[in-house]
Amino acid sequence: MNLNTTAKDSSSRSAATLTFSETATDNDFSDNFVFVGKHGSLTSSAISTLLGHNQYASLIDAMLQCTKGGSGTATSFAPAGNTHVKLTVIVLPSADKITRNNHTFSPHALTDHLNEIGLQRSTSPGVVEIFVIDDNVKEYMCCVAAAVARALPLYHSKSKKSSSDDKEMDDVDANFTAVNVSFYNEKGNAITNGDSNSLAMAQSVADGVRLAGKLGDMPPAELNPTTYSGICKDIASKLAAEGKNVTFKEIVGEQLKDGGYGGIYGVGMAAQCPPRMVVMTYTPKDGEYTEHVAMCGKGVIYDTGGLSLKPKVGMCGMKHDMGGSAGLLGGFMAAVQLGVSRKITLILAIVENAIGPDSFRNDDILTMKSGKTVEINNTDAEGRLILSDCVSYASNCLDKVDVIVDMATLTGAQGIATGDLHAGVLAKTKTMEDRIYKAGLATGDLCFPLLYAPELLKKEFNSKVADMKNSVKNRSNAQTSCAGHFIESHIDESYEGDWVHVDMAYPDHKNERATGYGVALVVGLLEAPGCC
C-alpha cells in the first residue's frame, strides 16, 4: 500500500523500501550485510553459512569479540574482488540479562543500534540485507518488524543543499534502494519457508508503524484535520479495493454540534479546519466474527493548550499529540490487511486545539455526547474531552461492542508512572489488563498496568455547577489513572463489555521522532494471523 497520501507531500522522496522475505534477495547490488542476534546465538558459523562461505570467519570472530561478551555493534569492510562489502553485527543482550517486563529480543535496543550504525546510509547503491538469527526468532518477528521500521522513518523536509557533514542529511540522501529482512535459526537455516502468514504480518506491521510515524512527524501545516481525514478515507478506499469489507464516514463541524458531540466540537471549533470524528469499520468477509472491538483514538493534530496556553518549551513537539490516533490507524490498516477474525470499528477524534475568538474557555460548561456536563478548568486537558465523545459513541451508537480500547498521548504523568518505553494501561477487568499486558510483551509495544480505582479517584473531578470538571484537583493523586477514569465515566451505563485505556504519551516519540507506537500492540491484541 502506498503510504504517501498527502497532497503537499514530497517528504518521502528518499525513503527506503522495507521488505520481509524468506531469504536474502538475489541481488548483485547487495554489499551491505547486517547480522542481528542475541549474545550467544550470533556466531561466525551461522554468519558464514548465510554468506555462503567462510572467507570472513576470522574477521567476524573479531567483530563479535568487540562486544566483550555483552551487547553492542561492530562494523568492518571486507574485500570482495575489485570492491568490498560492509559487514555489521548487532549483538543484543542474552536472555538472562532481560527482566520480566521487557521483550526477550530487546526491540528498543535493536532500533537504537540500527540508528547507531546509520541504517539509512550506505556506501553504494543497492540493498541492505538484515539477517535476524535466533532459534526462537519466529516468535520475535512482530517486534523485529516494528523495531526496524522505527529506524527507517518516512517523513523529512530537509533540503538536499544542506551541509554535507549533517548526519541527519545523510539519512535524507541515502544511497541505498531497499532494506530487506529475513529470519534464520542459529544454524543459518531460514525459518519462514512457506510461512506466508508470518512474513505478511511482519510486512503489515512495518508498513503500519512507518505510516503512524510519518503522520506523527508531519507538521500541522501539512497534517490538519482535513488532510488527516483524507488520508483515512484513502486508506479505507484502498483496503476496500483489495477486497476488504471496510467502510468510512465522518461527522464534521456543525454536524458534531448538532449531534451532541460537545467535547470534540468544543475543543476544535476555534481552528481554521473544522473538527471531525472519523469512523472506519471492518467486518470479516464471511460476516462472522468472534468479537467486536471499538478502537478510539485521540487525534489532536496540534495542541497549543488552548487558552490555558502551553509555555514555549512545552508546546514544541505537540504535532505528536495525535499519536494515539496514528497508532490505531496503522494498527487498523495492518489488522485488516491480515484478515483478523474480529470486527473492528475505528473511531478517531481529529481536532486542532487552537486559539481564536471561538476558543472554548475555562469556566465554560460543555455537554458531552454522553449527556453529562463538564465544567472546564483546564483547556489543556482536551484529549479526554474528545475521547469521551468517542467512547460514548462506541458504547451506545454501535451494534454490540465487546471491547472498547482508547489510545492517547494523554498525560505527562504517564512517564512518571510507567516510564519512557511502557505505556500505562487502565483496564476495567483483570482479564483485559492481563490480555493487553501480554500483547505488549509479545509484540514489543510494552505497557504496564495503572491503578484502577474509580470509586476512589473520580472525586478529583467534583464540580459545584456541572457533573464534573475536566482536570483533577490534586495532581499528585494518581492523575494518569484519573484521566482514564474521566473517559470511562462517559461510557454508556448500559454497556456490558470490557474497556481499556492506553496512555502512551512517552512511548509515542523518541529523539523528536514519532515511533509509531500502538500498531504492533493492536495487531497483538487482535491476534492477527502470523503474530506471536
Image (tube, rainbow, N blue to C red):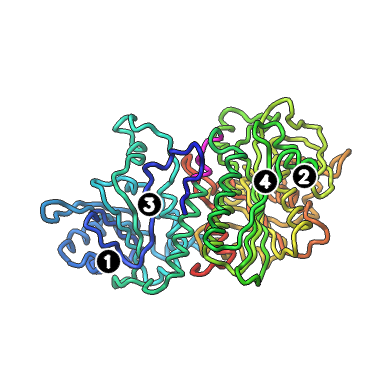
Secondary structure of residue under mark 4: strand
- Distance in Å between CA atoms under marks 4 and 3: 31 Å
The reply to whether residue 105 is visible in this rendering is yes
- Distance in Å between CA atoms under marks 2 and 1: 59 Å
In this view, the mark in front (2 or 1)? 2
In the rendering, at what x and y percent does residue 188 appear? 29, 70
Residue at the disc numbered 2:
261
Q: Amino acid at mark 1?
A: Thr
| Mark nearer the N terminus (3 vs 2) | 3
Label 3 crowd bin: few (<14), some (14–19), many (20+), radius 10 Å: some
Residue at the disc numbered 1:
43
Label 4 crowd bin: few (<14), some (14–19), many (20+), radius 10 Å: many
| Mark nearer the N terminus (4 vs 3) | 3
Q: Amino acid at mark 3?
A: Thr
For the residues labelled 3 and 2, say whether their Cβ atoms are less than 8 Å apart: no
- Distance in Å between CA atoms under marks 1 and 4: 49 Å
Question: What span is colored magenta in the figure?
Answer: 214-220
Q: Amino acid at mark 4?
A: Ala
Residue at the disc numbered 3:
17
Residue at the disc numbered 4:
349
In the rendering, at what x and y percent does residue 62 appear? 21, 58
Lateral position of residue 60 relative to residue 337, left or right:
left
Q: Residue at the far right: name it.
A: 465
- Distance in Å between CA atoms under marks 2 and 4: 10 Å
Quadrant hosting residue 31: bottom left
